[in-house]
Image (spheres, rainbow, N blue to C red):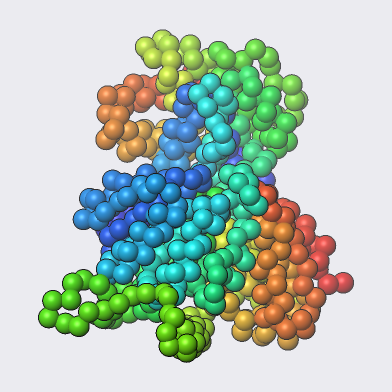
Amino acid sequence: MQTGTDNETRIVIAGFGGQGVVLAGNLLAQACVEEGKNVSMMVAYGAEMRGGTANSTVVISQGTIYSPVVVRPNIAVILNTPSLEKFEPSVTAGGLIVANQSMMNRAVKRGDLKVMMIAATEIAHGLGNVRVANSVILGALIAATSLLRLASLERAVETLMAQKKAALVALNLEALRAGFAACPS
Amino acid sequence: MSTQTAKILMKGNEVMCEAAVRAGCKFFAGYPITPQNEVPEYLSWRLPQAGGVFVQAESEIAAINMIFGAAATGFRCMTSSSSPGISLKQEGISYIAAAELPCVIANVQRGGPGLGNIRAAQSDYFQAVKGGGHGDYHLIVLAPSTLTELYALTMNAFDYADHYRNPVMILMDGILGQMVEPIVTEEYRPLFEPTEKDYILDGCKGRKPRIIKTLHLQPAEALVEVNRRLVAKYKRISSELKLCEDFQTDDARLIVSAYGITAQVSKGAVLQARSKGLKVGLIRPITLWPFPEAPFVKAAKTAEKFLVVEMSNGQMIEDVRLAEQCLRPVEFFGVGGGWYPTTDEVLDAIEKSYPA
């Protein structure tokens, strides 16, 4: 799927603090490094708190990235309802919303967006840990777009988590693959 | 950590730290403040690993005075903070400049005035460039606009500091500090031949004692002499160290000028304007002091207008006007307080300013 009006893909990943939006942003960025793509990632660093909303943004390009700041994303990865409220209006027309159906109490209102709902938390629960819902939804994102290869994301999990979170590598790989498989084609 | 030829993901604040460590920084003192907190966090483990000392000081004022001490004893040293914290350090900075000691001071600027907010800003330009502390002194002020440049300039900062015996400020902002990009951590290559520091206080056994001081009461002319020496040094720095990027200015009718992350955003806008057939160029000062006037003088001969873009109410614009000697109109796009421009907004400003 082609996203973005230029060669740049601008992604926002948003959810509650603790849902792993920072890790998800880091994984996407690392996957870009694995593929030799240019990437710029930022985490919202306002007065975030546990349970509040948090987001990270990722800009991916084959060319030079001139601004790391994402104002109008063309992809929004939404992990909870408050984040849908916040970011649905800013997505560019024709853009994509990948949303965690398990945490959504309403549908996407706009008619000019592609929408993919995925029960990420339920799938993660089935794998034994709801905290990997972020990896599930990343897997689905990769399946829904031709943004990055699943193998690059798998390598990113190994690169970023092998040292400090080695015990969680296998689970996150499983979550990525489950999300990838769950994406309706 | 060995030399990486592969790209690794790093946050701007960490990029600066890694470069500092590799350039031989052996002492850091600082006090936490957003958006530069990754600096003390990273150096707290990385500096000891490289045989250095990390101190979380009790205040910004304590930290800058610890830097005074470390520099006086000959160690490459660094402190960092963000806008309100840098204001607190000004007395110490003036003292270090007066004592002609080398050190690196990073300001990851945030919104002001006052305690402001924690969003990115460029409102401390005057403070950095015109002297935020008392007395006639100058900092060498470096303004990187990408993380790759931040890495290189941080290493250079230590070299300039030692070479000129002068404090160097790295003027960043919250976006540069917080953005994460892949970078190659190149090995440190000194810019100058290392010279012996013949002024440091390292024990005077077998030699005459040395004194480093900033109070000069007697004779009456002593402080004037110090000032004359400083003037001569600043002239030398001005003649040797003016760094600037000149981008597509040759046929430009409108010259955009910006520094730091704003310059990178503006460069994207300049390219978009070019693709629309507008003849626009960019002059990006890399040293903010000494300010690179020459490219502005040259551009003013052919370009019809300048447009300065800053995340402030308009500070560098004054130096641009001085540099181009008011030959052409200079317009401004920006505001302080944590606002930042998108490439689309800069493009819009370019189209509005473009000569008819």
Q: Is residue B41 left or right of residue B344?
A: left
Residue B223, x across and y down, in percent: 47, 84
Q: Residue at x 70, y 35 (%)?
A: A90
- Give the left or right position of residue B197, taking residue B272 as reference: left
> In the rendered image, which quarter contains the N terminus of chain A?
top right
Q: Is residue A36 visible?
A: no
- The residue drawn where x is 63% and y is 31% is A96
> What residue is drawn where x is 52% and y is 76%?
B137
Between residue B64 and residue B168, name the one nearer to us.
B64
Residue A175 in which image quadrant: top left
Q: Residue B165 versus residue A57: which sits nearer the camera?
A: B165
Depth check, front residue: B68 or B217: B217
Instruction: Please determine whether, in this image, residue A169 is positioned above or below residue B92.
Output: above
The location of residue A65, given as percent across then percent down, is 56, 54
Quarter of the C terminus of chain A within the rendering: top right
| Position of residue A32 measured from the top left corner of the image (x, y, whole percent) | 44, 44
Residue B222: tell me if it is visible: yes
- Look at 77% across and 72% down and name the residue there: B330
Q: Quadrant of residue A111?
A: top right
Count of numbered tags: 0
**Residue extending furthest toward the right:** B356
- Work out which residue is located at the far left of the displayed protein and give it: B206
Counting from the top left corner in percent of width and height, residue A80 is at 59, 20
